Image: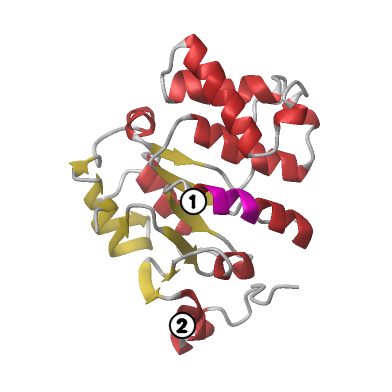
Amino acid sequence: MTTALELDGIRKRFGRVLVADGLSLAVAEGQLLGIVGPNGAGKTTLFGMISGEVAPDAGEIRLGDRPITSLGPAARTRLGVGRTYQVPRPFEHMSVFENVLTGAVYGAQLGKAESRETALRVLELTGLLPVANRQAGRLTLLARKRLEVARALATRPTVLLLDEVAGGLTDPEVDELLAIVGTLREQGLTVLWIEHVVHALLRSVDRLVCLASGSLVADGAPAAVMADPTVRQVYLGADVRTVAS
């Protein structure tokens, strides 16, 4: 099985807080990996280190067989790392179409015709085509979440990082989001997904890891990880929805 992304001995400290303690993780091509853990576990920092926004103190990150540890966010995007943010960050005064087109032009560095074609295809995939001309700042939360995914997909990633894309959505809206994720799975995209709405992960991912205090405390089949005593103890007092409505 070919490895799409690999972290080898990653360490990161902010002052006295250790957020990655010799973290090693390999994700296979086409795998849908869920990442859970309590607040402050280092999950978003992990995405920052993969996308190039946060520099690790030690260790190596490889995209396929290519080391990318020293590369910045723009270079990693061009090589195939796409990401969303927990709080959507659209260009609010631009249209939905223009937001997605920006990802194709500046992320994937496509030509004019190919950028438009890519943007339209992604808008159709994410269900945003009917609102393509709407100002992004006027979108509902669900549409903003979809736009986050659409902008990332427009960069033509081989590895997609989803950060809390189900947070704040109703159960029917989560179902709509899962349909999009299911399509990405069918297309063979490698996905890493951080999520507190755990029932969404349990319905979607091939593999689940739990991160706590900068270390992996469990890794395996989703149901087995959530039943692990260490994972359950980590989540004591946390607001985690594990049962679908």
Pointer 1 and pointer 2: residues touching (CB < 8 Å)? no
What's the residue at 77%, 29% (across, down)? 130
Q: Residue most toward the front?
A: 186
Q: Is residue 131 visible?
A: yes
Q: Mark 1 points at which residue?
A: 186
Picture quarter with the C terminus: bottom right
Judge the density around disc 2: few (<14), some (14-19), many (≥20) Cα neighbours within 10 Å: some
Where is residue 212 shown, x and y percent of the image?
43, 71
- Say which element carries label 2: helix
Q: Where is residue 69 in the image (x, y as percent from the top left)?
A: 25, 42
| Residue found at the very far bottom of the displayed protein | 229
193 w.r.t. 87: above or below: below
Q: Majority secondary structure of the magenta segment?
A: helix
**Residue 126: image x %, image y %?**
64, 39
* Of the two numbered discs 1 and 2 in the rendering, the one whose residue sits closer to the viewer: 1
Res 224 label: 2
Task: Please tell me which residue lies in front, 52 or 173.
Answer: 173
Q: Nearer the viewer, residue 199 or 210?
A: 199
Coordinates of residue 125 in the picture (x, y in percent): 61, 38
Residue under the point 48% across and 53% down: 44
Residue 168 in sight: no
Mark 1 crowd level (few <14, some 14–19, many ≥20, 10 Å Cα): few
Question: Is 161 placed left or right of 177 in the picture?
Answer: left
What stretch of residues is rendered in magenta?
178-183
